[in-house]
Amino acid sequence: SGSINLGGIRIVTGTNTTGSTAISASTSFGVSTHQYESITVTGLSGFASAPKVFASIDTDYHEANIAGIKDITTSSFIVMYNCSRAAGITSRDISWLAIGEAS
């Protein structure tokens, strides 16, 4: 993880590991969403306003994906992810990048 300011733009990167369990849902929303979970990332600093956040999950399960990123503030955000199989999203690294106006 790291951070840099370029002019008035701030970029912060990091990696967080997902938990060892996932939540099971009905397959009526689609098989790929059968297992899901979220992780809260905290500790952001140096942003004047909520940054734009991008994330990816390090997995070899082709159907695993980042479902969304929500509740973004200048200091934290939540990454939601899902997969048809729990093994595709448990104990996996999520790499993220936050970019926005420097404070």
Image (tube, rainbow, N blue to C red):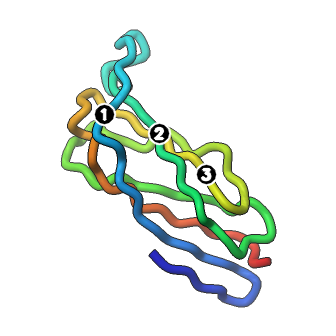
Q: Nearer the viewer, residue 61 or 2?
A: 2
> Residue 90 is drawn in which quadrant?
top left
- Residue 41 percent location from the top left of the image: 54, 55
Q: Along the polypeptide, which appears first: circle 2 or circle 1?
A: 1
**Badge 1: how crowded within 10 Å, few (<14), some, or many (20+)?**
some
> Residue 27 is drawn in which quadrant?
top left
Q: Nearer the viewer, residue 78 or 55?
A: 78
Quick check: 2 above or below 49?
Answer: below
**What distance separates the C-alpha of mark 2 from that of mark 3?**
10 Å
Instruction: Give the residue displayed 63% in from the left and 69% down from the top.
Output: 99
The answer to whether residue 56 is left or right of residue 6 is: left
> Residue 25 is drawn in which quadrant?
top left
Amino acid bearing label 1: Thr
Q: Which mark is residue 77?
A: 3
The answer to whether residue 8 is left or right of residue 85 is: right
Quick check: 52 above or below 60?
Answer: below
Q: Which residue is mark 2?
A: 38
Instruction: Give the residue displayed 21% in from the left and 37% down from the top.
Output: 87
Instruction: Give the residue displayed 63% in from the left and 56% down from the top.
Output: 76
> Regarding mark 2 in the picture, which secondary structure is present there?
strand
- Residue 50 percent location from the top left of the image: 74, 59
Amino acid bearing label 2: Ser
Amino acid bearing label 3: Phe
Q: Which mark is residue 21?
A: 1
Quick check: 51 above or below 61?
Answer: below
Given contact means CB atoms under 8 Å apart, are the residues at marks 2 and 3 in contact?
no
Question: For the residues carrying marks 2 and 1, which lies nearer the camera in this image?
Answer: 1
- Residue 36 percent location from the top left of the image: 39, 30
